[in-house]
Amino acid sequence: MSGKLHIYGDNRSGNCLKVRWTAEHLGVPYDWTDVDVLSGSTRAEEFLKINPSGQVPAVILPDGRTLSQSNAIIVYLAGLADSSLLPTDLYERAKVNEWLFWEQYSHEPTIAVRRFQKAFLNKPDDEIDPQLLAKGRRALGQMELALAARDYLVGDGLTVADIALVAYTRVAHEGGFDLSDFPNIRGWIARVERDLRIDQAEAA
Ligand SMILES: N[C@@H](CCC(=O)N[C@@H](CS)C(=O)NCC(=O)O)C(=O)O
């Protein structure tokens, strides 16, 4: 136990990058252990003690307690730091949660899953569930509409909702989603990447 936050993750995974970006934005020192999601390492006995679900990201907090689920981790880190990444206004905080739940139910299971099948499993399009493209585009349409009237998903500045949603939206093209039809989303991605100091060329 180093007394530091310890993140277990794979740098190709948007869910893991959410946690790394949040820690870096907040200036929280951390150690990082690479867990290759393609090699079965998430099923190793030692890792299952940290996250019985066998998935990354997972963290060990400085006091030794464990936490998993990307959005739960970033909310915890932002709350601990008392950061504007988590609004204090209860309605705005509920809107952040609305986006976080939506991300896990309607966005990540379509956009991230299609990206994984295409870019990591190299599946040809005709072997991928066609519903993923339609549902992913519908999710992008919803974001495009929301971002027509605002620069960030909630309130006037960056929140954990933007961090959670940008993770897979910025690499949606790798899943076959053409962002040229979504100018508001493209502007928002550039803003969030700038705020988080994400290198455009960074592996995602
Ligand atoms: N809902 C979880 C999803 C985590 C997840 O799907 N992790 C993937 C990598 S992105 C993983 O660990 N896959 C390996 C496995 O399931 O064995 C979260 O947000 O943290």
Image (tube, grey):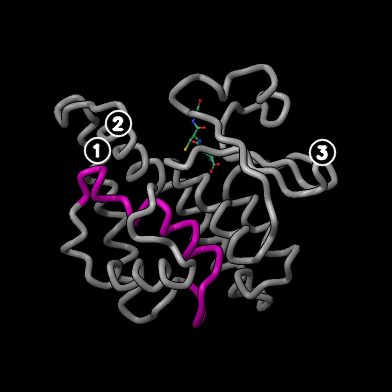
Magenta part of the protein: which range?
A: 154-177
Q: Amino acid at mark 1?
A: Gln
Q: Residues within 10 Å of mark 2 (few under 14, many from 20)?
A: some
Between the residue at mark 1 and the residue at mark 2, the CA separation in whole angstroms equals 13 Å
Left or right for 132, reference 112 = left
Q: Which residue is mark 3?
A: 1
Q: Amino acid at mark 2?
A: Gln
Q: Residues within 10 Å of mark 1 (few under 14, many from 20)?
A: few
Q: Residue furthest top?
A: 45
Q: Position of residue 203 (x, y in %)?
A: 38, 47
Q: Amino acid at mark 3?
A: Met
Q: Position of residue 149 (x, y in %)?
A: 34, 81
The residue that appears at 66% across and 65% down in the rendered structure is 27
Between the residue at mark 1 and the residue at mark 3, the CA separation in whole angstroms equals 45 Å
Q: Which residue is mark 1?
A: 131
| Mark 1 within 8 Å of ligand 1, using the beta carbon | no
